[in-house]
Amino acid sequence: RYGDTDGLFEDHPRSIYPWRDWVVDAFNSNLPYRDFISWQVAGDLLPNATVEQRVATGFLRNNPTSNEGGIIDEDYRVKYLVDRVNTTATAMMGLTLECAQCHDHKYD
């Protein structure tokens, strides 16, 4: 999931390395699992959040990006949210939710 570049079109570099370094430090310092997860999902929402807790939320910014001209803001926002939900469910719960994008009928 982690990448030093956006991987699309012109493959521009990204500055997501602080999150990667945070993950390595979290493992090396035996950060409790509950903190490891909650900081990545909502570290910036904690009362008096530290820089470390805010950096942890880089997990939610680890999505494909594009510098493509003419992008439709709402289309990108929806794709970003779908990617965030799928990645969080897969990484944190071991579930895949991609099928929910198409199978939205009441009785399937």
Image (tube, rainbow, N blue to C red):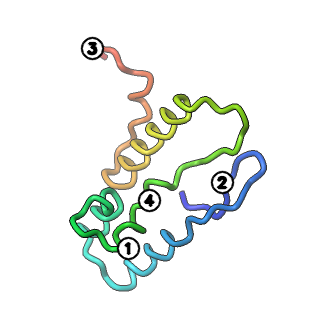
In the picture, residue 73 is in which quadrant? top right
Going by the numbered disc 2, the residue's amino acid type is Asp
- The numbered mark, 3 or 4, whose residue comes first in the sequence reads 4
Going by the numbered disc 4, the residue's amino acid type is Phe
CA separation in Å, label 2 and label 4: 14 Å
Above-or-below relation of 17 to 13: below
Residue nearest the viewer, comparing 48 with 74: 48
Going by the numbered disc 1, the residue's amino acid type is Val
Q: Residue at x 61, y 47 (%)?
A: 65
Q: Nearer the viewer, mark 1 or mark 2?
A: 1
Q: Identify the residue under disc 1.
A: 51
Q: Which image quarter is the C terminus in?
A: top left
CA separation in Å, label 2 and label 3: 39 Å
Q: Residue at x 70, y 31 (%)?
A: 70
Q: Which element type, helix, strand or loop, lies under badge 3?
A: loop
What x and y, as percent, mark residue 40? Answer: 35, 62
What x and y, as percent, mark residue 15? Answer: 60, 65
- The numbered mark, 1 or 3, whose residue comes first in the sequence reads 1
Q: Identify the residue under disc 2.
A: 6
Q: Which element type, helix, strand or loop, lies under badge 2?
A: loop
- The numbered mark, 1 or 2, whose residue comes first in the sequence reads 2
Callout 4: few (<14), some (14-19), or many (20+) C-alpha neighbours within 10 Å? many
Residue nearest the viewer, comparing 72 with 3: 72
Q: Which element type, helix, strand or loop, lies under badge 1?
A: helix
In the picture, residue 92 is in which quadrant? bottom left
Q: Which element type, helix, strand or loop, lies under badge 4?
A: helix
Q: Residue at x 35, y 47 (%)?
A: 89
- The tag on residue 107 is 3
CA separation in Å, label 1 and label 2: 24 Å
